[in-house]
Amino acid sequence: MTLKTKLNLLFCLIIFPFAFIFAISTSFISLKKGSTNTFCGSCHLMKSHYEGLVEPKSQYLSAKHYRLREKQEDQCATCHVNYRWLGPLEARWRGAKHLLTYYLDPKLREEKLKLKEPYPNNNCLHCHIDRKNFENSKAHEPVLCEIKINEISCISCHGPMHPKGDGGKSKNE
Amino acid sequence: MNKRIWIALVLTALGVLTALFCLYRTTPYTITQFFFVGWPCIILGVIVYVVDVVMQIRKLQQEAKHQVVCANCGHKSHHR
C-alpha cells in the first residue's frame, strides 16, 4: 500500500467521518444547551431580563410563568421559540442575527431591548387556549377572534413581561 | 502530501476546533462561531479533498491513455 493510498484511507475513513459526526453531535448538544435560561442570560444585554425571571419576588409575567412551571430551565425558549415547524431553528437564526447586529452596529448597543417582530399570540395560545379561564373570561369574549388571528396582542393587556434593566426589583416600568 | 490536502486538513481541523470550543463553553458567541465558521470550514475541507481526489484520478486516467505495454516483456512506457 503506497503512502498516497494510506493517506486517502485515513481521510476517508477516519478524519472526515470523525469531523462530521463530531460537528453533528456538537450541533445537537449546543442547540439543547442553547435553550436554557442561563444561556440566554449569558449575554450582557439579557442580564436584567434573566435576573427579573429568576428573582423569587419578581412580579413580572415571565417570572410568574417561571415559578409556576415544573421544568424551569428552558423558560426563555418556551415563550420565545415559535410553535411551528422549524421554530427552534428559526429562533436560533434570530438569535444569531441579534448577535451579528450587536457586533456590527455599535449604535444599537445603546438602544433599549426590543423584539424585532411583534410577539405572536400563538406562543401564548399554545398553552392558554385550552384553559377554561381563557375562553370564559369576560374580558376576552369580545376580542376572542382578534386574539386568535393575532390582531390584538396578548401583551398589550398582560404584562409587564420583563424589567427594563433593573433586575426585576420594580414592577411598574 | 500536496497543497490541497494540507488545505483540507487545516480547514477540517479549524471546524473541529470551533466545535470543541463551543462544547467547552456554550455561549451565544461560540455557538454562532461554530455554525457560521466551523461548519463551513468542515464542508469546505471535504470539498477541497474531493476536488483533489478527482484531479488525481483524472491525472491517472490521462497517464493511462498514453501508456503502451511491450508485447514481448510487458514493460510499460509512455509515448508522446
Image: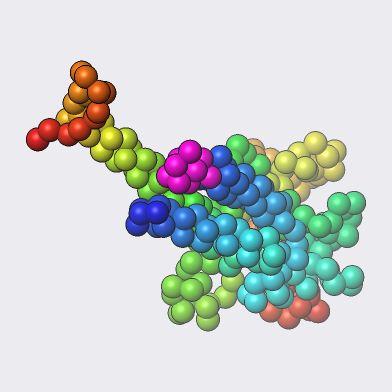
Q: Which quadrant holds residue A156?
A: bottom right
Q: Residue at x 32, y 35 (%)?
A: B57
Q: Residue at x 26, y 23 (%)?
A: B74
Q: Which quadrant holds residue A62?
A: bottom right
- Relative to residue A2, is residue B45 depicted above or below? below
- Relative to residue A141, is residue B71 depicted above or below? above
Q: Which quadrant holds residue A130?
A: top right
Whether residue A40 is visible: no
Q: Position of residue A106 (x, y in %)?
A: 46, 79
**Span highlighted in magenta in the image:** A1-10
Tell which of B48 and A117 is nearer to you: B48
- Relative to residue A12, is residue A162 depicted above or below? below
Queried whether the magenta region covers residue B30, the answer comes back as: no
- The dominant secondary structure in magenta is helix
Whether residue B63 is visible: yes
Queried whether the magenta region covers residue A2, the answer comes back as: yes
Q: Position of residue B28 (x, y in %)?
A: 61, 65
Q: Is residue B64 left or right of residue A101?
A: left
Q: How many marks?
A: 0
Q: Residue at x 75, y 62 (%)?
A: A37
Tell which of A21 and B35 is nearer to you: A21
Q: Position of residue A107 (x, y in %)?
A: 45, 79
Question: In what quadrant of the picture does the C terminus of chain A appear?
Answer: bottom right
Q: Position of residue A121 (x, y in %)?
A: 65, 47
